[in-house]
Amino acid sequence: MSKRALSLPALIINNITIAIVPGSLTYKGGKIKTNVETVSSGGGKVETVHSRDATEAKSEVKFQMRLTTDVDGKIADWDDNVAENVIIFAEVIGKQKAKRIFEGMSLIDDPERNVSPDGTVELVFQGEQMI
């Protein structure tokens, strides 16, 4: 059976649809990492020890926007909204709706703006694990 890729999602931040550079949206769901270490029991024998590490269990949403006249205001609003931004992206593919939800998100850096005819700014949010 053929499947279509999630490729043209609508990005919504705090109930406002945001125009982004096509193909620039990436995300991490905030999976808890599994560490695998080895221990030696002598004589060349090794065993593995598995553990779960939640220290990096946070989601991340990254995308680019065109550097338009209203971008600085949007960035300032999102930056002020620490741990309160809600990011949703969704796309209807055939009869199915693909949807990802990220709550408790913060803009984590001071984004660099590229001032040029095709200028962009990359934004990175991190927060609660993806719902």
Image (cartoon, helix red, strand yellow):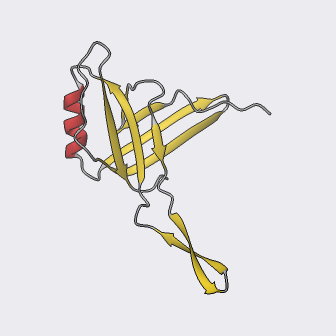
Q: Position of residue 116 (x, y in %)?
A: 26, 16
Q: Could you tell me which residue is drawn at 36 percent across and 30 percent down? A: 64
Tell me if residue 88 comes above or below residue 120 in the rendering.
Answer: below
Judge whether residue 111 can be spotted in this image. Answer: yes
* Quarter of the figure with residue 49: bottom right
Tell me if residue 113 comes above or below residue 59 in the rendering.
Answer: above
Q: Could you tell me which residue is drawn at 39 percent across and 39 percent down? A: 62
Residue closer to the observer: 118 or 58: 118
Tell me if residue 92 comes above or below residue 53 in the rendering.
Answer: above
Q: Residue furthest right?
A: 1
* Quarter of the figure with residue 112: top left
Count all numbered tags in the image, as a single digit.
0
**Left or right relative to 101: residue 48:** right
Q: Could you tell me which residue is drawn at 46 percent across and 38 percent down? A: 26
Judge whether residue 17 can be spotted in this image. Answer: no
* Quarter of the figure with residue 11: top left
Q: Position of residue 24 (x, y in %)?
A: 44, 30
Q: Residue furthest bottom?
A: 42
Q: Residue furthest front?
A: 43
Q: Position of residue 110 (x, y in %)?
A: 22, 40
Q: Position of residue 95 (x, y in %)?
A: 67, 31
User: Quadrant where the N terminus lies?
Assistant: top right
**Left or right relative to 28: residue 108:** left
Q: Could you tell me which residue is drawn at 60 percent across and 36 percent down? A: 97
Residue closer to the observer: 119 or 42: 42
